[in-house]
Image (tube, helix red, strand yellow):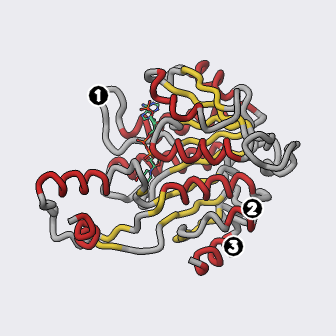
Amino acid sequence: MQAISRRLGHQSLKPAASLSSFKSIYPLSDHHYGADHPRHASSLAAKGVGHLIRKGTGGRSSVSGIVATVFGATGFLGRYVVQQLAKMGSQVLVPFRGSEDSHRHLKLMGDLGQIVPMKYNPRDENSIKAVMAKANVVINLIGRDHETRNYSFEELNHGMTEQLAMISNEHGGIMRFIQVSCLGASASSPSRMLRAKAAGEEAVLREMPEATVMKPAVMIGTEDRILNRWAHFAKKYSFLPLIGDGSTKIQPVYVVDVAAAIIAALKDDGSSMGKVYELGGPEIFTVHELTLCMT
Ligand SMILES: NC(=O)c1ccc[n+]([C@@H]2O[C@H](COP(=O)([O-])OP(=O)(O)OC[C@H]3O[C@@H](n4cnc5c(N)ncnc54)[C@H](OP(=O)(O)O)[C@@H]3O)[C@@H](O)[C@H]2O)c1
């Protein structure tokens, strides 16, 4: 665990206070998009959120100065990101597109008026601008591991991400943009979803060179969609089918640690800006080994 913190310190997600809650994240690599990687100039208002005016002792009833629009806040990772933002006294704007129920659990995480659900249409530019209007931070957690009738992988992971970055750029007051992608996302991946995710990362860093990209491995936690499914299946049928020989390796990461990584990046002195972090948990398992834990 300590080794992880040491590596993180080295990798510049700096503030020591944040790092203590950050224990099981292994930054598998961080790529620096510096002078050797020319990109367009950014219009990010200032380096990081360090200069924001804060009030109070730093708890839920204080004011962190951060007003964050969290796209995808209604999802698995979203609830932990919102919780950690609210816990330090930030205002969180929660764009939602479905029913009022989708964000009910988030309301209780912040002080009165700090969690603001806002209905929006992800295909309507003005609607996106409206949910970002008062923000100084944008976090994009939108993603899906399957296509739907209405949204292809490309539209969701690339098109929509690019649009959010462009609007944030035009906004002029967005100090931090955090994009959550996937470990393994690459233009040469055999998976269409991962190729679309990689195109999304590229678009964000082109539009906003000072954005931070987080690439978590498979996330686990109370509501995860991997261990829970396997456990239910194993409980019901007393066995788990294994696809292939089960030798595929995965490095599951605790969802709370991924949320902590996002918050630590937000709170740093700007040193995580323009960087890409790969986030994995402390142990690597084969799928076979993980399924054995379930049975
Ligand atoms: N879960 C993992 O193991 C894992 C691993 C690596 C990376 N990631 C990435 O981490 C991010 C968060 O993952 P997660 O597990 O929290 O995802 P999730 O639980 O599936 O939540 C996805 C979020 O994206 C929103 N969304 C989906 N389709 C949308 C659309 N067409 N328009 C607008 N919003 C849409 C959902 O809103 P609605 O509630 O309205 O559908 C929801 O808020 C994603 O980018 C994902 O690719 C996840």
User: What amino acid does circle 3 point to?
Assistant: Gly
Q: Nearer the viewer, residue 217 or 56?
A: 56
Q: In this figure, which residue is indicated by the disc labeled 2?
A: 271
Q: In the rendered view of the protein, which quadrant contains the N terminus?
A: bottom right
Quarter of image, res 183: bottom left
In terms of secondary structure, where does tag 2 sit?
Answer: loop
Within 10 Å of disc 2 (Cα), the crowding (few <14, some 14-19, many 20+) is some
Can you tell me whether the CB of the residue at mark 1 lies under 8 Å from the nearest atom of ligand 1?
Answer: no
Between the residue at mark 3 and the residue at mark 2, the CA separation in whole angstroms equals 11 Å
Reply above or below: 31 against 136: below
Left of 143 or right of it: where is 189? left
Label pair 1/3, CB-CB below 8 angstroms: no
Compare marks 1 and 3 and give the one earlier in the sequence: 3
Measured as percent of width and height from the top left, residue 240 is found at 15, 60
Between the residue at mark 1 and the residue at mark 3, the CA separation in whole angstroms equals 43 Å
From the image, state whether disc 1 or disc 3 is nearer to you: 3
Q: In this figure, which residue is indicated by the disc labeled 3?
A: 9
* Residue at the (68%, 37%) spot, across then down: 68
Q: Nearer the viewer, residue 37 or 221?
A: 221
